[in-house]
Image (cartoon, helix red, strand yellow):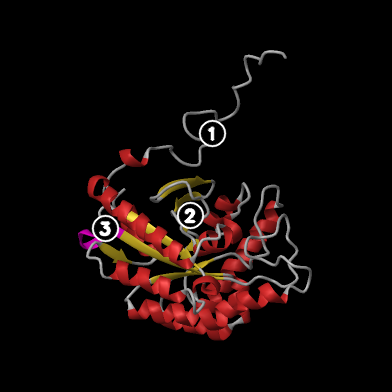
Amino acid sequence: MGTLSDDYLNYPERSYGMDHERYKWTMLQNRKEVQWPKGKKIALWINVGLQFFPLNQKGVPFKVPGGMTKPYPDLRHFSLRDYGNRVGIFRLLNAFDHYNITPTFAMNTRLAERLPYLTGKIKERGNEIMCHGYDMDKLHFGGQNEQEETDLVKRSLDKLRALTGQDIAGWISPAKNESENTPDILAAHGISYFCDWVNDDMPYDFKTKNGTLTAMPLSTELEDRFIILNNYHSAEDWADQVDDAFEFLLKESELLGGRILSLNIHPWVLGQPHRIQYLERILDRLSSHHEVWSSSASEIEKAWKMQQ
């Protein structure tokens, strides 16, 4: 076996931390402390995924998690996703209102087109809506033609802005999957923050060719679909893990400043009658705690930016 050449570890952008210039690599514990409004320790970000999974999915370049898994037509999974948008979502809305929680809705543009009644209901509430791509089968991926992706982003944002009447400042890609160009394209089309990178517990500046985005920390580890359907834990286990995360972040905030508890949830998962009680348990716990500030993703980003 030969030895490595002297230039083996010499390559473009090799540096301490991450080998790119998208953001400054820093330790969370060494950053400036953040204080949330009214001195609260925990910013609670409830992110609700409102999704459309096509029955005839193409799966390019891969089948999206949560999508169809059986031979066409996979009505079992297609109708379950539809259940969330016609039944489960209203259980979530009732719970948010009962516990005085401010949700943010991540919506596929195709869903907003297909279900004007649901779009109208969300619009009437006045809660923030972010773009969750066009639909759950329109993925952004490495090697994708840049103009093709640019057209997809523009179509998704233009149509969702028209349907909701909102500026749409936030973005989460289907499956949180990106190409090497996605952040640059998002910044060029009026996006302020995005949620695809899960490498932090707090926001951070993310450089693009078209200005700076805020990378917002939307945890996959606490996502209902990931814990319940991917890891095969019970809904009660999900609630216990959220509780554990809250307790830890609360203790950490006492030493290092404000923290964010982000919960990415889906009406087709937690909106089920056998699971909704565990969401209600968590909302009851968090809404009654004096150190919790429930707010939208944009307001949390704004509060963080003002202190940087």
Residue beneath the point at 59% across and 72% down: 109
Number of callouts in the render? 3
Q: Position of residue 296 (x, y in %)?
A: 38, 67
Q: Quadrant of residue 92?
A: bottom left
Residue beneath the point at 31% across and 58% down: 303
Q: Quadrant of residue 86?
A: bottom right
Mark seen at residue 36: 3
Q: Is residue 3 visible?
A: yes
Q: Is residue 301 visible?
A: no
Q: Quarter holding the N terminus? A: top right
Question: How far is disc 1 from disc 2 in space, using C-alphas?
Answer: 25 Å
Question: How far is disc 2 from disc 3 in space, using C-alphas?
Answer: 24 Å
Q: Residues within 10 Å of mark 2 (few under 14, many from 20)?
A: some
In this view, 206 is above or below 3: below
Mark 2, secondary structure of its residue:
loop
Residue beneath the point at 64% across and 68% down: 135
Mark 1 against mark 2, which lies toward the viewer? 2
Using the image as rendered, state which of residue 27 and residue 7 is in the foreground. 27
Q: Please state the extent of the stretch shown in magenta in the rendering.
A: 36-42
Q: Position of residue 298 (x, y in %)?
A: 39, 63
Mark 2 against mark 3, which lies toward the viewer? 2
User: Per the image, is 105 magenta?
Assistant: no
Q: Which residue is mark 2?
A: 221
Using the image as rendered, state which of residue 42 and residue 129 is in the foreground. 42
In this view, 18 is above or below 270: above
Q: Amino acid at mark 3?
A: Trp
Evaluate if marks 1 and 2 touch, with contact meaning CB atoms under 8 Å apart. Answer: no
Mark seen at residue 19: 1
